[in-house]
Image (cartoon, grey):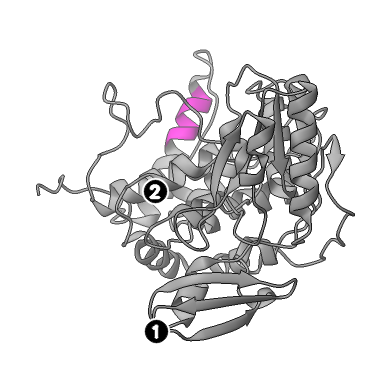
Amino acid sequence: MLLSNLLEYMGIERNRLHMSWVSSAEATKFIDVVTEVTEAVRALGPNKYFIKDQAKVA
Amino acid sequence: MLTYIDEIRAASARLLQEGAVEMVVGFRQGSQPMMNEPCLIRRPEDVDTLVWDSHCGINLTNYLTNRKEKIAVIAKGCDARNIVTHIIENKIEREQLYILGVPCQGMVDKRQIAMRVAGEITEVGESDTEIRVQTTRGEIQTFAKAEVLQQNCTLCTHRNPVLYDALIAEAVSEQTVDRYTDVAAIEAMTIGERQQYFQDLFAPCIRCYACRNACPLCYCPTCFVDEAQPQWVGKGQDAVDVMTFHFLRAYHCAGRCTDCGACERACPVGINMRVLTKKLEKDCVNNFGWEAGLSPDVRPALDTFNLDDPDKLIK
């Protein structure tokens, strides 16, 4: 929680960070989580911030 | 405050003479004005090199990490809180320490003074309320101490040491201030503004790691930035790598930082990276009621689990 707060504070939208515990027996929960994550991130669009396109060479 | 030094020297000499401690960690005059440096005194006849004035900002807890001998340490409010953190984290034993507590009314920010005078500062003197500087141009200027304190000192709510064996002088009154106005101002920004704010904030960073080296919490044998296998973060000046370094360093201090200001003071380009650690500090206070370094008998917030801990992230 401290981590997600700090990331949001630094300008990374809250919905880009997800965390969940899913057991190998919880297939439906896994589907729900994946759906939720992809929908949340798709709604935000591609992230341009805090991302290195290519390492800068000198 | 200027009279503290007599008591500090007397107590240090006594402890060394009695053999109660093997060394005293304190400050001596630095090679430049306003730059007192830490020193380790081992002989009673050397205690006169110790000094105490408004330029003793460096956190001496940094010099206690993994020490084996008996040590007397001169501790301000923030140092004492970091000593508590060191004891909790098994970096030193309480029994090894004789803590000479110094009630503190704040340390002066040398950068603020340097900015306000023309020319190089050659000499500095002080009274209880004022700082007097002389420059290469021969001018003498005086400043009210309260106006040139380090920002973390103006916001300090633990000026008296929380843990000590002897107090050098009478305790000073504690301040009641809102510690988090700067954090709240950033929180009030939009996402885009915050991105810009942090990009601008860290743009001057030269990755010298002075902030890490000055920090009493950063005692890992190999820091994540120095590791090559795996390499967690790029080592160059790339803006994203610089931000990753500051973000992770701050996070490693979560629930441990006492806002002693060592990082900001050490920074050669004057970056206020404390806005990151203060955000974590604020969240710890608000969510876990936790302030670092107040008692060696209480386990830190990130070290304990309570059923009523806030849990909004994990679904």
The kind of secondary structure element at disc 1 is loop
Say which amino acid is labelled 1: Arg
Query: Percent x, y for residue A14?
Result: 50, 51
Outermost residue, left direction? A58
Q: Residues within 10 Å of mark 2 (few under 14, many from 20)?
A: some
Label 2, on which residue? A41
Label 1, on which residue? B137
* Quadrant (top left, top right, bottom left, bottom right) of the C terminus of chain B: top right
Query: Percent x, y for residue B202?
Result: 36, 59
Depth check: give the residue in front, B98 or A8: B98
Outermost residue, front direction? B45
Depth check: give the residue in front, B248 or B142: B142
Depth check: give the residue in front, B12 or B105: B12
Who's the residue at 79% across and 42% down the image? B10
Q: Is residue A30 magenta?
A: yes
**Quarter of image, res B107:** bottom right
Q: Residues within 10 Å of mark 1 (few under 14, many from 20)?
A: few
* Cα separation between marks 1 and 2: 60 Å
Q: Is residue B307 visible?
A: no
Say which amino acid is labelled 2: Val
Identify the magenta region: A28-34
Q: Is residue B227 above or below residue B10?
A: above
Q: Relative to A24, is B207 on the left or the right?
A: left
The disc numbered 1 marks a residue on which chain?
B
Residue A40 circle label: none
Who's the residue at 66% across and 35% down the image? B45
* Quadrant (top left, top right, bottom left, bottom right) of the N terminus of chain B: bottom right
Depth check: give the residue in front, A22 or B272: B272
